Image (cartoon, grey):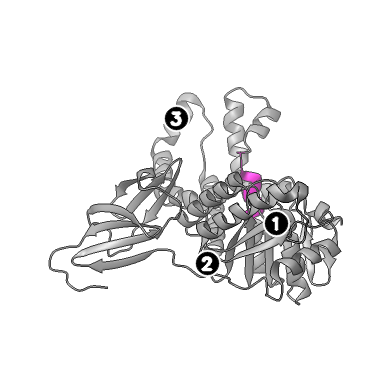
Amino acid sequence: MRILMFTGKGGVGKTSVSAATALRSADLGYRTMVLSTDPAHSLADSFELAIGNEPTLLAPNLWGQEIDLLHQMELHWGRVQEYMSAIFMWRGMSDLVAEETSVLPGMEELASLMQITALAESGLYDVIVVDCAPTGATLQLLAFPELARWYLDKIIPFQKAAIKVAGPMLKRMIEVPLPDEDLFQSIEDLVLQLHRVSDLLGDPATSSMRLVLNPEKMVVKEAQRALTYLSLYGYATDLVVCNRMIPTTVSDGYFANWKEIQAKYRLFVEESFSPLPILDVPWFDDEVVGVEMLRRMGAALYDAQDPTTIFYTGKSQEVRKTNGVYQLRLPLPFVEKSDIKLTRSMHDELIVHIGNWKRNIALPRVLAGLPVQGARYEERDLVILFKAQEGVNGDQ
């Protein structure tokens, strides 16, 4: 079972690359599903075929699906949305406005993300190819399951206890709608679903993130940031796709300057993302839409290689002990030491801040309770130092 997720800056051609990869996979005999987490579905346009909210056969061994978001929302968010609507109505909103307001930003995309789990667990497909929303939205979605799991572990038990004690008094005094046991169960079910999504997409043997970019400065910079944040949350990236390279066979003249710019940034891509493999896709002489053009793109991209291959395997995090000091190493490429801030929230939890992003890291048992001695950045790794307990010897 393989899940291939393509992300990148809007407009770089990730939908075409996703569709071409799915078609290539199907041509090799894998039962393949291709879908999008972007509400602005464009897969149907890419294939020039109608795609419905049920699996639709697009080619031999290839199915596509445009998620029925209303159904997914009702399935995963219905009970919680009912309660939020009741709160908003209690505050004086009309029924219609309360219902619309209770749909939190990103929930539609999250519903699509949870559909990946359902498809993977169905046993009907060997490969699932996901055309992700543009980079920023994708990163927010991939960060959400960990945040939700933290909420379930830390906040829900406290809230349930508080409502049990103070709920009857609050209801008599201000007549506020209060959450009941069914609501808490719905939230827990939702978070557990997200936990399954996180486990599935975080398993490097099953899921691979793939960055699609063009050889342009702003695009490459955003891809660098994406790789940093994907690494921060432990999602394995195994491939970079450099799309729309002007072929060397194209004569110079008007394209001479563009070819020079692309050559410069193609070298920058190589320097930036090594040791990740980088595959080039040429700028075709025709629009990449329809099965035949997508097949051409897939052949140009992968040549004789199987697109389901795990192209690169790297470490996620590592614990070492040297001279009485433990090191927790996290791969975080493209980040300056000055951008990193560490906060110890509990004895078994460390918060890593990078700009506006943060991750709660559950420390391994051997590090829980040990004081943080310092941190440094080396060889694209954030190295956090912990002072070992006295009397504990040996290196690892």
Q: Which residue is mark 1?
A: 245
On the picture, is 391 further left or further right than 275?
A: left
Residue extent of the magenta highlight: 104-114
Residue at 74 percent across and 45 percent down: it is 40
Q: Are marks 3 and 2 in contact (CB under 8 Å)?
A: no
Residue at 84 percent across and 68 percent down: it is 59
Q: Quadrant of the N terminus?
A: bottom right
Mark nearer the viewer, 3 or 2: 2
Kindly identify the amino acid type of the residue bearing the numbered disc 3: Leu
Q: Main secondary structure of the magenta part?
A: helix
Q: Quadrant of the C terminus?
A: bottom left
Residue 135: percent from left, percent from top: 60, 48
Residue 127: percent from left, percent from top: 68, 69
Q: Which residue is mark 2?
A: 203
Q: Mark 1 or mark 3: which comes first in sequence?
A: 3
Residue 260: percent from left, percent from top: 65, 51
Q: CA distance from mark 2 to mark 1?
A: 32 Å
Query: Are there few (<14), some (14-19), or many (20+) residues within 10 Å of tag 3?
Result: some
Kindly identify the amino acid type of the residue bearing the numbered disc 2: Asp
Query: Are there few (<14), some (14-19), or many (20+) residues within 10 Å of tag 1?
Result: some
Kindly identify the amino acid type of the residue bearing the numbered disc 1: Met
Residue 297: percent from left, percent from top: 77, 63
Q: Which residue is mark 3?
A: 170
Mark nearer the viewer, 2 or 1: 1
